[in-house]
Amino acid sequence: MADSKEKLFSDFPSVSTGQWMEKVTADLKGADYEKKLVWKTNEGFKVKPFYRREDLEGLSTTDALPGEFPYLRGTKKNNNWLVRQEICAKCPKEANAKALDILMKGVDSLSFHIRTEELNAGFVETLLEGIEAAAVELNFTTCQSQVIDLAELLVAYFQHKEYDVKELRGSINFDPYNKMLLTGKEKGDIVQTAKTLIEITQPLPFYRVLHVNAITLNNAGAYISQELGYALAWGNEYLSALTELGIPAALVAKNIKFNFGISANYFLEIAKFRAARLLWANIVSSYNPECLRDCENQGPDEECRCAAKMKIHAETSSFNLTLFDAHVNLLRTQTEAMSGALAGVDSLTVTPFDKVYQTPDEFSERLARNQQLLLKEESHFDKVVDPAAGSYYIENLTAAIANQAWEIFLGVEDAGGFYVCLRNGLVQKAINETGKARHDAVARRREILLGTNQYPNFTETSAGKKPAGVCCGCGEAGETDVDTLNMSRAASEFEALRLETEASGKRPKAFMLTIGNLAMRQARAQFSCNFLACAGYEVIDNLGFETVEAGVEAALAAGADIVVLCSSDEEYAEYAIPALKAVDGRAMFIVAGAPANMDELKAAGIGNFINVRSNVLETLKQYNAQLLK
């Protein structure tokens, strides 16, 4: 059988890259290869339309093995990850009941968000009653002013319960830098608090208390390389500051946990996590961490290789979630979860699809859990370690993202480190500029949000839904002396526009006046319907009219507020001005397209044109200002 297979493949001659390029060039028929087929990512590097074996030459990433330094292919030799669910613990008894319930439904990592002024031993006892701490990862987030109290309470609780501390896994989310990014507030001595936390939690060797919440950058719209580059500098800030106080580098590194977001760019996200582990391992290694126990996992100079393992929790992004057509969020979070799972993260949270407009209910939380369980139990994503390894495409993406992120990291270090850059607002400025650019891309449909800025549901209404706030916040007082991040979602401005239309009590009606060339009028009518429905307008498509007068008469009879002329560029010279005269100011008149004689049509009084180069958001804002008076 093997011989016959070899003979089969030998019958097909190999094709060189040069031959492929000759074929591609011929098929392009004179079009520019770079402009037509080479994609430039937001990160600034180019992606080719195809990759070959020779593209792997010189890449060190292909030499890595799972579970081995520098951990590009994972920090472990299996691909099992923990399914995490967030619990807002305002009432410890209610939070405990919910935790016990979901632990029976596939969750093996809990994240308690604690907001209480009465944090005491009784609170912790009630919260964790009946939960076998050795069998589940436990993660805790509270106000930064309470983290030390929480750490002391947890250590006392686990010791009182006589747990084997080597079996306990979890974290306490201390991250003052994230607080600065979100609130502009800095409180207390960051480094001393971090030092105290490490000392208090020494009895819990596998608890991590220093967090890098790069998920915040992701949710603010950061590009992938920015999220990674700043996350590395963020983590290095802990390493640098605490080792200067005499804390061993290995101990500091083993207390750091990275929390990343996962955006919609499927392959680039896989590459991001692979690059993250590689770069972090090399950063930690540069501190020559001394092995604190007898361990075989040591480098050539006996440095601790275990300390160089990046602990990664990942969460699907909130930046691209939408209020309208909200069930599309399930598709977004599913592909994002796939990226994280295939990339080998340690734990994963899938954001419930309805988080945008309400506190997630039991149904949406169940769906979010099952999205991960399906990847494990039916797709078997946990059975293969780093399946992307060796892919010509992904290996090149990994190297490219690593290079871009490393440049950002070095830039931050040259500027004085992550804390200094936060104080100076450099990080916030860079991320906010990126967020603004992405919002502009959404406004122009260069970045698509299905159901929001493209292909909206024509008949959908908000049904009372409004953008929701955060489940658990913290109202600590403090100086507001640094810039903050803009955390608005990509869809927020389109949603505000559509909600404005609904609140007005008047739903403008847009009538497609289709005439002339069949293919062009149908294409432009479909484009125009999708364009105008993004503002919540009622759209009426038509099969076609013999004359523009007949079309206008039908539009006005239907009570149209907008008449959209849909035809070919060549025919607009014949139809546009007569149509404008027929409308005679009784409705807004729009021409679909950007005909060559646009200046002539404008001179005749036609002021509204919609086409692929239009800023959809700004155009619809202008229409709302006129139509909703």
Image (tube, helix red, strand yellow):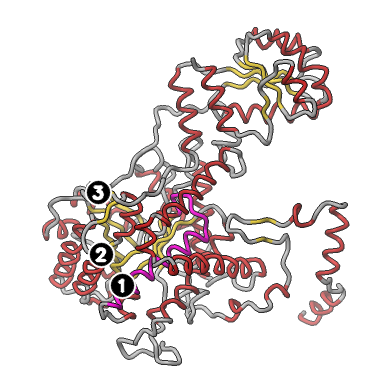
Q: What is the C-alpha distance between the residues marked 3 and 1? A: 26 Å
Q: Which residue is mark 3?
A: 474
Which amino acid, by three-letter code, is at mark 3? Cys
Residue sitting nearer the eye, 316 or 193: 193
Which amino acid, by three-letter code, is at mark 2? Ile
- Under circle 1, the secondary element is helix
- Under circle 2, the secondary element is helix
Which amino acid, by three-letter code, is at mark 1? Ala
Contact? badges 3 and 1 (CB < 8 Å): no
Query: Can residue 100 be spotted in the picture?
Result: no
Residue drawn 40% across and 63% down?
313
Residue drawn 30% across and 78% down?
243
Query: Can residue 561 be spotted in the picture?
Result: yes
Q: Which residue is mark 2?
A: 190
Q: Is residue 272 left or right of residue 82?
A: right
Q: Position of residue 116 (x, y in %)?
A: 17, 50
Q: Which residue is mark 1?
A: 241
Residue drawn 47% across and 44% down?
321
Number of the front mark, 3 or 1: 1
- Under circle 3, the secondary element is loop
**First of labels 3, 2 by sequence position:** 2
Number of the front mark, 3 or 2: 2
Q: Look at the picture and state if 37 lies above or below 466.
A: below
Count residues near mark 3 (Cα–Cα under 10 Å), then give few for <14, some for 14-19, many for 20+. Answer: some
Contact? badges 2 and 1 (CB < 8 Å): yes
The magenta stretch spans residue 304: no
Residue range (magenta): 218-244
The magenta stretch spans residue 239: yes
